[in-house]
Image (cartoon, rainbow, N blue to C red):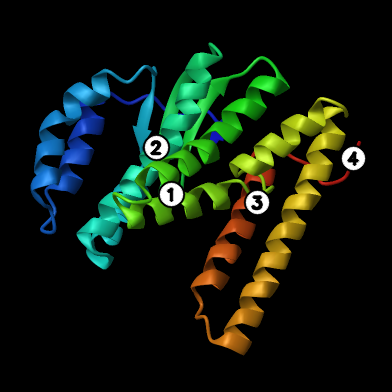
């Protein structure tokens, strides 16, 4: 997920050490060992000036590795990596400067210096497009990876800020409306989508016994919408 929030600079050595510590967990596998040996060189080659890995990201990966099968775990990592690579590829193709990447427990934030709403729209939608492309490519070789990638792309394409679809919606509205009004309209649309999703999840639990996972997903997304609105000083009422 693209974002334009400031991040604290950390050395590539410290980042690599945190990642190696995660990969040394008891549930590691040969592919994790091989990846840990290549991490320092891979991180140094990243075309960005800042890379920050939050402790929550390491904890979330360890928890996910312990809860799911190895195949599902690596399929999810591949889908997530392809998604973020889509954002970066679009940025480099448009000559947008990427100044930082932050990996959190729930998302990845890519800090870019876009100069137009067109660039922001393309960079935002490039992530879901890359997810769909990976789904098409891997549909026969690895159906699990294809399914995960498709779900990741569709979820991020929702018109909910700070998801990719919400950022693209705000940027496209900014082409025709003042920024304050574009933020207000996109904010209300995002809240409406979250509210509808949360109501639908609750109905699913009551009528079909789907479990609480969908409720948790929509609840977390709603909290993220409100948190980002507070961090960026967004207002849901047009000026």
From this view, report whether residue 66 is shown above or below residue 5.
below
Number of other residues with Cα within 10 Å of mark 1, as a class: few under 14, some 14 to 19, many 20 or more: many
Residue at point 12% right, 53% down?
Answer: 28
Is residue 4 among the parts visible in the rendering?
Answer: no
Residue 222 lies in quadrant: bottom right
Q: Mark 3 — residue?
A: 225
* 1 and 2 marks in contact (CB < 8 Å): yes
Q: Mark 4 — residue?
A: 238
**Local SS, label 2:** helix
Residue 80 lies in quadrant: top left
Left or right, 36 with respect to 181, comes to left
Q: Which one is earlier in the sequence, the residue at label 3 or at label 4?
A: 3
From this view, report whether residue 217 is shown above or below residue 131.
below
Residue 113 lies in quadrant: top right
Is residue 215 among the parts visible in the rendering?
Answer: yes
* 2 and 3 marks in contact (CB < 8 Å): no
Q: Furthest residue to the top? A: 95
Q: Mark 1 — residue?
A: 149
């Amino acid at each position: 997920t693209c974002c334009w929030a400031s991040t604290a600079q950390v050395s590539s050595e410290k980042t690599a050490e945190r990642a190696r510590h995660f990969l040394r967990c008891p549930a590691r596998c040969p592919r994790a060992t091989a990846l840990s040996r290549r991490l320092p060189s891979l991180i140094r080659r990243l075309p960005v000036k800042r890379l920050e890995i939050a402790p929550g990201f390491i904890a979330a990966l360890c928890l996910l590795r312990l809860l799911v099968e190895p195949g599902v775990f690596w399929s999810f990592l591949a889908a997530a990596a392809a998604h973020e690579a889509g954002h970066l590829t679009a940025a480099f193709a448009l000559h947008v400067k990427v100044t930082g990447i932050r990996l959190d427990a729930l998302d990845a934030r890519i800090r870019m210096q876009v100069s137009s709403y067109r660039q922001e729209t393309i960079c935002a939608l490039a992530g879901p497009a890359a997810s769909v492309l990976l789904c098409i490519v891997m549909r026969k070789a690895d159906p699990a990876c294809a399914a995960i990638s498709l779900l990741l792309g569709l979820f991020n394409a929702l018109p909910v800020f700070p998801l990719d679809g919400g950022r693209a919606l705000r940027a496209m509205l900014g082409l025709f409306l003042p920024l304050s009004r574009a933020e207000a309209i996109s904010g209300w649309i995002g809240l409406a989508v979250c509210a509808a999703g949360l109501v639908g999840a609750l109905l699913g639990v009551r009528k079909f016994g789907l479990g609480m996972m969908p409720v948790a997903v929509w609840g977390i997304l709603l909290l993220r919408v409100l948190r980002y609105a507070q961090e960026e000083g967004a207002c849901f009422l047009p000026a």
